[in-house]
Image: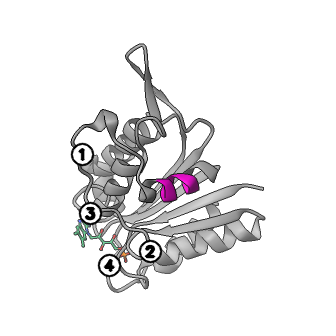
């Protein structure tokens, strides 16, 4: 049985991003996985903007412990967020700044970084207002994918299993059905 941690970074519960996560969770549970969800905007545990006096002596706070226990337990981390200003929403970046900390997610050996979250798999689901084709040609989608894959996922020793970008998402919701059907196939 797989332990899956679904991490959602969208302020609106009725968003397509949340509907995508709900679809994924239902399918994963059907497959026999155990799923835990972290809805960052609505979590009872919140973290202020990341700051420190000395990064090397950063102490593990209760909030970090809360999130890191969930990350530790998971075989797979599945992220859902809207594409904002070419990247992830600040709340998700803040989550990573705090909780993928030195000594937990990575360390240094002989001055070289070593990932500590070995054997965990990651999938990323993101939506943009701009059409997918547009971001394919400008390279925006690829830049985000490789920033997450190389600078976060692989740096921490994890494996990127999928990056799914759905474009042309607007208030009309006219492509939501097709997007949800695709998400279902990615479990
Ligand atoms: C703060 C903010 C920044 C955004 N930046 C972008 C962007 O850089 N590119 C883009 O295509 N859409 C951008 N959008 C639009 C969102 O990506 C789009 O509304 C979202 O993917 C729709 O998903 P939802 O229905 O789950 O909200 C932005 C929206 C907000 C609120």
- Mark 2 against mark 4, which lies toward the viewer? 2
Residue at mark 4:
170
Q: Is residue 19 a member of the stretch shown in magenta?
A: no
Q: Is mark 3 within 8 Å of ligand 1?
A: yes
- Mark 3 against mark 4, which lies toward the viewer? 3
CA neighbours of label 3 inside 10 A, class few (<14), some (14 to 19), many (20+): few
Image quarter hosting the N terminus: bottom right
Residue 161, horizontal then vertical, whole percent: 57, 46
* N-term-proximal mark, 4 vs 1: 1
* N-term-proximal mark, 1 vs 2: 2
* N-term-proximal mark, 2 vs 4: 2
In the rendering, which numbered label is found on residue 44? 2
Residue 187 quadrant? bottom right
The stretch in magenta equals: 65-70
Q: Secondary structure at mark 3?
A: loop
- Mark 1 against mark 3, which lies toward the viewer? 1
CA neighbours of label 1 inside 10 A, class few (<14), some (14 to 19), many (20+): few
Residue at mark 1:
52
In the rendering, which numbered label is found on residue 37? none
In this picture, residue 46 sits left or right of residue 86: right
């Amino acid at each position: 049985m797989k332990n899956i941690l679904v991490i959602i970074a969208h302020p609106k519960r009725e968003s397509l991003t949340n509907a995508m996560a709900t679809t994924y969770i239902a399918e994963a549970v059907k497959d026999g996985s155990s799923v835990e969800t972290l809805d960052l905007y609505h979590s009872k545990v919140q973290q202020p903007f990341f700051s420190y006096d000395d990064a090397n002596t950063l102490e593990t706070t209760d909030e970090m412990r809360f999130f890191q226990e969930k990350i530790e337990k998971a075989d797979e981390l599945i992220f859902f967020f809207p594409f904002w200003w070419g990247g992830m929403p600040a709340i998700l970046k803040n989550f990573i700044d705090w909780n993928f900390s030195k000594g937990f997610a990575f360390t240094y050996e002989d001055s070289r970084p070593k990932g500590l979250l070995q054997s965990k798999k990651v999938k990323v689901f993101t939506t943009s207002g701009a059409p997918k084709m547009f971001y394919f040609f400008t390279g925006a989608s690829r830049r985000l994918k490789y920033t997450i894959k190389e600078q976060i996922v692989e740096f921490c020793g994890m494996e990127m299993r999928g990056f799914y970008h759905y474009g042309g998402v607007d208030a009309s919701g006219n492509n939501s059905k097709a997007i949800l059907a695709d998400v279902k196939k990615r479990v």
